[in-house]
Image (cartoon, rainbow, N blue to C red):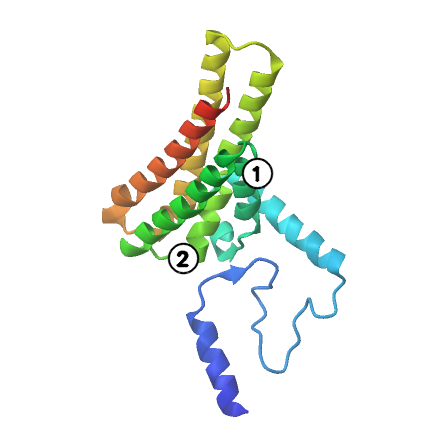
Amino acid sequence: MQLEKQIVSKEQSHLSGDIAGTKANKIPSLETDFDTLNEPVWDTVKRDMNAVGAKFKHVFMPENNDRLIREWDLWGPLFICVFLSLLGNGPHFTEMFTLTFFGSCIVTLNTKLLGGKISFFQSLCVLGYCLLPTGTAAIVCKLIVFSSEQTTTLFALRLLVTVAGFSWATYASMTFFATSQPPRRKALSVYPVFLFYFVISWIIISRSK
């Protein structure tokens, strides 16, 4: 029994961050029960949704704290990825979903190869949540398209909205990544993030016709 406790303690010391919904001030042991074991399903869902909403707020109002990274989850990125994909029709769904998923994985892998002090899933969490501004821009562009016939002025408006979403997504992600990147390699880590959000934004402006 003592050996099992030592193994669990050693494994906990190597974990990076906390999964959203768990309490950081409690270290699970062999003698403690999980909080959600006897918890109603609705309470669990409500707590997770509140955590997702809090992270959405952090994206729109980014600041230099590590909460989004430390309390990572993949529910929000999954919702945003599926939502962006649903804005397309037919094969566009597969194209957008594949691009957002594998694109974020490639950017995350680049971050790790450059020596970033962040886990793989934490990086996916940040990149996924920071797609929220581009998703908001996609909604606005769709509303503009449905409102009236397209003119040069309306295209310029859609372009402005998309650029704003792209800029905010890039700014928010780099704010969260700021403390996890080696100082001498920040430019190498910024470029893939910039390119990732640029491609997503380009698809949004080109498909909102």
Asked if residue 27 is positioned above or below residue 132 in the image, the reply reads: below
Asked if residue 105 is positioned above or below residue 192 in the image, the reply reads: below
Q: Left or right of 66: which side holds 188?
A: left
In percent of the image, x 45 and y 56: which residue is there?
A: 121
Q: How much space separates mark 1 and mark 2, taking CA atoms?
A: 23 Å
What's the residue type where badge 1 is placed?
Answer: Phe
Q: Residues within 10 Å of mark 1 (few under 14, many from 20)?
A: some
Say which element carries label 1.
helix
In percent of the image, x 47 and y 83: which residue is there?
A: 7
Across and down, in percent, residue 202 comes to 40, 28
Front-most of residues 84 and 29: 84
**Is the Cβ of the residue at disc 1 closer than 8 Å to that at disc 2?**
no
Across and down, in percent, residue 71 comes to 53, 56
Whether residue 115 is visible to the viewer of this picture, yes or no, is: no
Q: Quadrant of residue 172?
A: top left
Front-most of residues 156 and 53: 156
What's the residue type where badge 2 is placed?
Answer: Phe
Q: Which residue is mark 2?
A: 120
Q: Which residue is mark 1?
A: 83
